[in-house]
Image: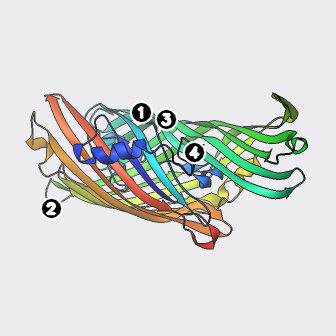
Amino acid sequence: MCHCRVKPEGFLLLVFLFASFYVSAQTGSVSNPLSGRENNPYSKYGIGELGSANTAEITGMGSITSAYEDQFQLNPDNPASYSFLKRTTMEAGAIASTRSVNGSNLSYTTGTMAPGYFMLGVPVGKSGGLSLGIRPFSRTYYSLVDTIFNSPIGSAERSYGGQGGLNYAYFGGAARYKGLSLGFNFGYLFGTFQNVSAMIPIDTLAINRAYTNSYSNYTGLGGVYWKMGLLYEHKIHDSEHLIRFGATYTLRQNIYQTFNSYQTSIYYFGDTTVNDTVSSKAQATGVLKMPSAFSAGISIGRIDHWNVGIDYSATQWNTYSSQPNTDMNLNVGTSSQRLAIGGEYTPIPVKAHKYVSLFTYRAGFYYGEDYLTIDGHKLPMYGVTLGGSVHFKPTHFSWVNLNTSIDIGKLGNTSNGLIG
């Protein structure tokens, strides 16, 4: 399953303008006319597709977040980076994406465009920083249909659909002593999921078209969620070159869950349609046990000029579980992992400019395994990223950065009866 994401901030860089318009325009296809959104069948499982909540700058470098900091850019994935901020920073972004799904008996392309994130960072003294914002955590949208010919009601279509996702509103802080910084994000993880399946008769006989059965599940989630990070920065050779080591850790945490289930029948009487709720279960409550996770990375670079790094992250999904909506446990594997390499290059260092613009170029690569296991098979994922920024200095006291990134990758494969 191929996917392409574009994350613009403000106006897009001219070099990526055509690609961005192409992606945002892919909102459906003839082979999938009922979907005007990005249709990801794998998002049916677990908590959906884990969204990249990183900024456009970081995404363009393959999301090497553990050992990355910038005095004018936010890195919310490692809260220890906040203490390196030199100026008050505000970032907002949108995400446009297109996805091509291929399998033994299906092929379609869908896409979507939606708001991404909003974040604010504030330096505190010479060795502290604060940040707050809201970021996407996961998303679900799928729409699938198959046909059966020997059901008790004759030929029928079975449809499966779902939508929803999780968002994270957070407040974070960091403090630094010499080159070592410690930080945290403390916030609220929340969202809803709706899953619907239906049996739709397609026989021409009126007696067999008497009713359609629909089953709907609604899951609401909300709870405190936090993460800690550290980052160490050391000057090498001279004051212009730095080496950084970083790591983050997230403990296993419980998110409050509510669950409602309904069965609805639709009766056809000539031109009249009657909807009837056949059964409903009383709201049940429980918890979603989010897994523990960690990341570690190293980077090296020259201040305001270039930076390259490598990052590794892993999540222990064997500590994950959902109750009372046990359907969210289906096909969740025991672990996931990701390795990324990336960097950025500014031909003319920022401090060499006063009131003119300059450019930063970024690129990256990542490879790993998704957290889902389908029919006993892990889902590989890999991709390349490109990005860039235009920096303006309209006044002596402020900078304006216009950023964009493109993530072109693949999830899964078409072997073993899966889709890719």
Give the number of the mark in front: 3 or 4.
Answer: 4
Counting residues from the start of the chain, the first of labels 1 and 4 encountered is 4
Residue at 35 percent across and 36 percent down: it is 129
Mark before the other along the chain sequence, 1 or 3:
1
The quadrant in which residue 379 appears is bottom right
| Number of residues whose C-alpha sits closer than 10 Å to that of mark 2, classed few (under 14), some (14–19) or many (20 or more) | few
Tag 3–tag 2 contact (CB < 8 Å): no
Q: Is residue 238 above or below residue 90?
A: below
Specify which label sits upstream in the sequence, 3 or 2: 3
Q: Which tag is nearer the camera, tag 1 or tag 3?
A: 1
Q: CA distance from mark 3 to mark 4?
A: 38 Å
Q: Identify the mark at residue 237; answer none if there is no mark.
A: 2
What residue is pinned by disc 1?
Answer: 118
Marks 4/2: CA–CA distance: 60 Å
Instruction: State the image quarter where residue 273 is shown.
Output: top right
Q: Amino acid at mark 1?
A: Phe
Q: 11 and 18: which one is in front?
A: 18
Residue 170 shows which numbered tag? 3
Q: Which residue is disc 4 drawn over?
A: 33
Residue 176 x %, y %: 33, 43
| CA neighbours of label 4 inside 10 A, class few (<14), some (14 to 19), many (20+) | few
Q: Quadrant of the C terminus?
A: bottom right
Q: CA distance from mark 1 to mark 3?
A: 11 Å
Element at label 3 = strand
Mark 2 → mark 1, Cα distance in angstroms: 38 Å
